[in-house]
Image (cartoon, rainbow, N blue to C red):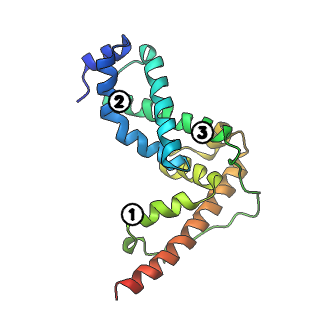
Amino acid sequence: MITIDTIQDCKKGRRKGQQKLFDFFAGQMFNVCNRYMNNREEAEDMLSQGFTKVFKFMPDFEYRDLNSLRAWIKRIMVNECLMGLRKSVNFSLVSLSDHEEISYADHNLGKIEAEYIVRALNELPIGYKTILNLFAIEGYSHKEIAAMLGINEGTSRSQLNKARKMMKEKLDIESNQYGKRKV
């Protein structure tokens, strides 16, 4: 458990406190990084770089409660991942086209195991995956996403719709295969 003493140790740069904070949050924050990055190694790099920033800026952080600490660390991790993606030559958004609205009313996600959803998400082009994560998982608005990525809001909306469509197609295929295996 994280205590005020742990926070104070981190603020003073003490390794004991930093290790305790890292151990407490590493798993959760790795999952955040892994949602954005192409592979485990990149996610681990972002996790490491993120915690380096957490410890660097910890003296300026005003601790209120565990939830505010978690949110602050998560925001640092997301920002590190976005910076890492911007540096990557593979990061690009797919060109704009008409918005496509997708209906999920007939889609049966209940039959699909979580591992297939994660795999489908990881198979998305990096631009789609990033915007889907920022919007659907992190809860950022299109205006915030546009500012973070240096794109316009329409591009963010379009990329999200394309990501949703691609996810639906991947999950429909998996749902049909899953249904056949359950016979």
Q: How far apart are marks 1 and 2 (CA)?
A: 26 Å
Q: What residue type is labelled 1?
A: Ala
Q: What residue type is labelled 3?
A: Leu
Q: Of the residues tagged 3 and 2, which is closer to the observer?
A: 2
**Residue named by callout 2:** 22
- Residue at point 38%, 29% (across, down): 68
> Could you tell me which secondary element the residue under label 2 belongs to?
helix
Q: Counting residues from the N terminus, which is met first, the one under dot 1 or under dot 3?
A: 3
Of 55 and 105, nearer the camera is 55
Q: Counting residues from the N terminus, which is met first, the one under dot 3 or under dot 2?
A: 2
**Residue named by callout 3:** 82
In the picture provided, is 105 more to the left or to the right than 14?
right
In the picture provided, is 85 more to the left or to the right than 176?
right
Residue 164 location, x and y as percent? Answer: 58, 63
| Residue 60 seen in this snapshot | yes
Residue 111 location, x and y as percent? Answer: 38, 75
Report which quarter residue 80 is drawn in: top right
Residue 63 location, x and y as percent? Answer: 36, 20
Residue extending farthest to the front is 41
Q: Say above or below: 168 vs 121.
A: below
Q: Is the C-beta separation of discs 3 and 2 under 8 Å?
A: no
Q: Counting residues from the N terminus, which is met first, the one under dot 1 or under dot 2?
A: 2
Numbered badge on residue 114? 1
